[in-house]
Amino acid sequence: MCAAWAADRCGGRGLGQRSSRTLLGAVASTAIVLATTGCQGQDPADSLGVFAVSGTLTQSCADGGLLAAPQSKQFFVELKRYRTTLHWLEGGERLYGSIESDGSFAVETYLLVDMRQDTPDADLPPCYLERVDQRLGTLAEVGAGESSGFSGELRYNIIPTAESDCSDLLAADEPLASELPCLIAYDLEAVPYAAE
């Protein structure tokens, strides 16, 4: 039930504290908006194309447990560019990142979760996890305003905050992960999507 969170996209409405179950099934996080256009009614960003993306798992927090990740994932994304800002449009959400002149880009989102929210217990130490999602890649050569694809990496970084002690969750019958902090990573390959 909890592996599915790693397949979710992160596109956000604001920094929130969520339970472990909500985190693992979450479809929301906080996008770090590196730049905005300030325009209304008209999108000044140029489309680089719509892509079908395939991901292959290269690193996991655990083979089992709550943070177990699927071996592969697929999704669609549209990329747009406005000056040095990359727009990542996926599942109805628009995230903002940076793009360099060589086509390399980075888009990052952030989520803070209170793992004790659903089961408050005064005898347990606090356990807050930061989830930092990174979409890193390089666009193939752009022609006629669109790219022929991109390759890159999707990284889910799961990091306890400095004041947290989550050791009981690692030792549970259904452990959260094999260790914390931990990283789930996918290699990404994207090709232009052609609607049938």
Image (tube, grey):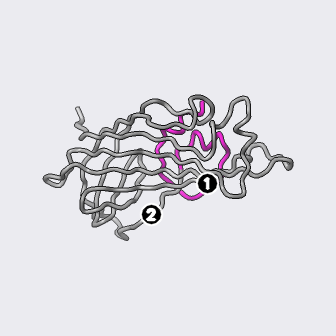
Q: Residue furthest right?
A: 123
Q: Which residue is mark 2?
A: 33
**Magenta segment:** 1-28
Residue 9 placement (x, y as % from top left): 46, 44
Disc 1 residue crowd, few under 14, some 14–19, many 20+, Cα 10 Å: many
Q: Is 121 above or below relative to 171? A: below
Residue 102 placement (x, y as % from top left): 24, 59
Query: Is the N terminus in the top left, top right, bottom left or bottom right quadrant?
Result: top right
Q: Secondary structure at mark 1?
A: strand
Residue 156 placement (x, y as % from top left): 50, 46
Q: Residue at x 66, y 56 (%)?
A: 161
The reply, left or right, for residue 74 in relation to residue 146 is right
Q: Residue at x 58, y 33 (%)?
A: 62
The reply, left or right, for residue 50 in relation to residue 36 is left
Q: Secondary structure at mark 2?
A: loop
Disc 2 residue crowd, few under 14, some 14–19, many 20+, Cα 10 Å: some
Q: Residue at x 46, y 41 (%)?
A: 185
Q: Which residue is mark 1?
A: 112
If you read the primary sequence from the N terminus, does the residue marked by circle 1 or circle 2 appear first? 2
